[in-house]
Image: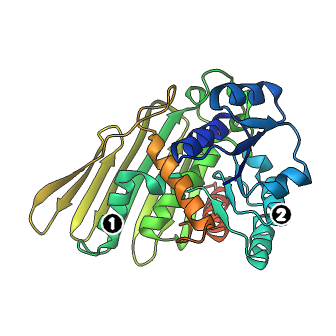
Amino acid sequence: MKFLNIGLGSMGKRRLRNLHALGHRDIVGFDPSEARRKEAEEKYQIKTTGHLTPELMDEREFFIISTPPDRHLEYLQLGVQHKKPTFVEASVLSDGLSEVAMEAHKQKVIVAPSCTLRFHPLIKVIRELVKSGRYGAVCNFSYHMGQYLPDWHPWEHPRDFYVGQKKTSAGREMVPFEMTWLVDVVGIPREVTGFHGGTHDMGVDIDDTYSVSMRLPGKALGTLTVDVVSRFATRSLILNMERGQIRWNWEEKIVKLFDANTKNWVHYFQPEGQAAVGYNVNILEEMYVEELGRFIHAAKGGAAFPNTLSDDIKVLSILEKSESTNRGAVI
């Protein structure tokens, strides 16, 4: 199988590692940066190019887009134009996606937007517990994701890559990144409201904290807090159901379920996993490998990838609607 890896930055290199882990070696990497191309050639023994020619795109069988979010659209359009199954990293910009989705459907081209956390082993457990119905309907949930932005790329200042730009900022990006797995568990919200703003001077003009409240299907309510000022990286969830409570804190590597029927706590332990050098120990490489494997399987005619551009557009609308209500009554 022949892959075209578009973008050789942090995520692009991760996808090269994923492809190698899956046993794939016929890869051409594209990046305008000569330094990034040279690094990829030396570390991953692949061919690279600074130019995307029609001949190259026709010759490659699969596209993987790992560019900054504001460049996704142009490469998605190329993937559909050349009728190539295309995987694209999580986005934060909805402009043009509806048109690409319609054209991809017309041309019968598979487009797989990233939904990495759906492949986290304990999020799979959470989903199964909720979807099983054994503990009744969801009543409410509170979820917090926090990281410290300068820790993302310690080798460069946030102002020097997309996370330091207002529209593609880290805090803004992480709202749909987290909502993509949350809606898979609890459903698409019926109503959304929220606040967002800058709370900490990190040398960039961005909104570093988002608080999103939502009314879910049925009677359930939920809150999502995303921030990029947390000095200790965290993901933590409390989810209440009619006959149970789920607690998850990612550094504990356990999902805890209180079963109200038996009055007992049940623990689900995270399997052992690996984190790439320089990344948070809780960011498991295995979920990225599994995700890319599912894309390849779908592109070869197997089971559909669990996320679509239409799904992505719905999730991005949650972000946009939350932003449009960034106001409140003064007490």
Q: Which of 186 and 117 is in front in this view?
A: 117
N-terminal label among 1 and 2? 2
Q: Which of marks 1 and 2 is in front?
A: 2
Q: Nearer the viewer, residue 34 or 47?
A: 47
Amino acid type shown at disc 1:
Glu
Residue 26 falls in image quadrant: top right
Vertical arrangement, residue 153 with respect to residue 267, above or below: above
Q: By what rule are the colours in the image chosen? A: rainbow
Q: Which residue does the image show at 52% across and 52% down from the upper left?
A: 116
**Crowd tier of the residue under label 2, counting other residues whose Cα lies within 10 Å: few below 14, some 14–19, many 20 or above:** some
Is residue 286 toward the left or the right of residue 252 in the image?
Answer: right
Q: In the rendering, at what x and y percent does residue 293 appear? A: 53, 55
Is residue 179 toward the left or the right of residue 55 in the image?
Answer: left
Vertical arrangement, residue 100 with respect to residue 176, above or below: below
Vertical arrangement, residue 182 with respect to residue 131, above or below: above
Disc 2 is placed on an element classified as loop
Q: Which residue does the image show at 50% across and 30% down from the upper left?
A: 279
Vertical arrangement, residue 174 with respect to residue 199, above or below: below
Q: In the rendering, at what x and y percent does residue 266 appear? A: 17, 55
Residue 283 in view here: yes
Residue 82, which numbered label?
A: 2
Amino acid type shown at disc 2:
His
Is residue 289 toward the left or the right of residue 325 in the image?
Answer: left
Residue 128, which numbered label?
A: 1
Give me the C-alpha separation between circle 1 and circle 2: 38 Å
Residue 208 in view here: no
Residue 68 falls in image quadrant: top right
Q: Which residue does the image show at 61% across and 43% down from the upper left?
A: 15
Q: In the rendering, at what x and y percent does residue 37 appear? A: 77, 30
Residue 12 falls in image quadrant: top right
**Quarter that holds the N terminus:** bottom right
